[in-house]
Amino acid sequence: MSTLPHIAVFHKCKAKGTYKGFHSPAALKVFGEKLKAAAVRDISTEAELEAFAGAHNVSVLGFFASGSGAEDEEEEFQEAAETFRFAHNVYFARVVSRDLLSAYGSKGQKWFTKSPSVVIVRNFDEGDRDVDAVLATELSDTSLQQWIEKRTVRIVDEITGLNFAYYESLRLPMLLLFVDKSHDNRKVQEAFKAVAKGYQGKVSFAYIDGKAHASRKMALGLVDDVLPAMGFNTLSGTLYPFPTHKPLTQQSIKEHVEGYLTGRLQPTQASSSPEEMKAAEEEAERLGAEGLIEVSRKTFADVCMDESKDVLVLFYAAAQQVTKDFWPYWRKTVERFRQLGIGCAQLPPPCCPCVCPAACVREAAI
């Protein structure tokens, strides 16, 4: 229990989860009625179906033609409903009417192609309905419960301290869009959501306050101050930042996602490019800190693990103000080492001055 107030659900002395809805008398009454009702409601008319589909944040509809031999799929649907009984905003209904199957199948609304199918209708935002469907007999690499669980969140949602753990529990790579919330981000968010609709269940899409979560942004390899910015939060921790010099359009976002999923997108490291390292060294020499070098992941072992000399290393984050404030002191440290002529414990190569060289490496480079 990390936050208060906290409402936990117990059934037959077993914890069934935390109530995550509104803490109001009306909302709690609705949740109590949900717990008392059957896990699956049977629907027989179009009016009932339409009302049910639009009444909840997440409405899960199972379309099963009677006598179709889909008993196993119906049983799995029932089991999934029992699992989500304690979720405040996920409701289940079963449709067996042939008229409704025809009206909402391939001949009508085209929510699905044929039965047995499961359809999820999401109504998180007013006037913005999302419909997703799966043929139950074609779920081979995942269970129906897992398929539903990955679709019980908004296609794109804002990441907060309250829902980040839930997104991580989905065990999906997460594409994070960092935005400046003081600016109008509607255009980039619309492009972001348009791409997200095509990758449900494969990638989680979310946006986050880029200024309030600058450290998270840098951890994903986005080390400058540019917003909006975008990067993958992967299960392995590998970095796939979107180049900040490129515009974030629907096409470029899709290419980044597709490149990641197909393996064409190569991981990058949050360390300096050769051009950045050379510029940093030239700037250090211009300021009188000769011998100060910029280190990247690729050069770290050669420079810092060289047993022929001692190396003093500063690990830093380029985008943080504390780095900029500390830089003059670090430069003076390098200058002082040279002035004092402090020798190394071991003789350096002839090409190196007999002082302890200083190396800089970005925080996320190693």
Image (spheres, rainbow, N blue to C red):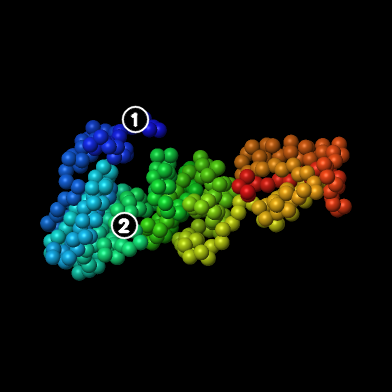
Q: Earlier in the sequence, mark 1 or mark 2?
A: 1
Q: Observer-nearest residue: 197 or 118?
A: 118
Residue drawn 85% across the image and 41% down it: 343
Q: Is residue 21 above or below residue 293?
A: above
Can you tell which mark lies on residue 287? none
Q: Residue furthest bottom?
A: 107
Q: Observer-nearest residue: 186 or 162?
A: 162
Left or right relative to 214: residue 135:
left
Q: Residue furthest top?
A: 4
Left or right relative to 231: residue 191:
left
Left or right relative to 260: residue 325:
right
Residue drawn 56% across the image and 61% down it: 266
Q: Is residue 57 above or below residue 19?
A: below
Q: Observer-nearest residue: 140 or 341?
A: 140
Is residue 188 visible in the rendered image? The answer is yes
Residue 210 at x, y = what percent?
A: 51, 45
Residue placed under numbered mark 2 in the picture: 143
Q: CA distance from mark 1 to mark 2?
A: 34 Å
User: Which amino acid lies under the numbered mark 1 shown in the image of this protein?
Assistant: Pro
Label 2: element kind: loop
Label 1: element kind: loop
Residue 193 is drawn in which quadrant?
bottom left
Residue 221 at x, y = what percent?
A: 57, 51
Residue drawn 30% across the image and 34% down it: 8
Q: Is residue 124 above or below residue 335?
A: below
Quadrant of the drawing holding the N terminus: top left
User: Which amino acid lies under the numbered mark 2 shown in the image of this protein?
Assistant: Ser
Residue 93 at x, y = what percent?
A: 19, 53
Residue placed under numbered mark 1 in the picture: 5
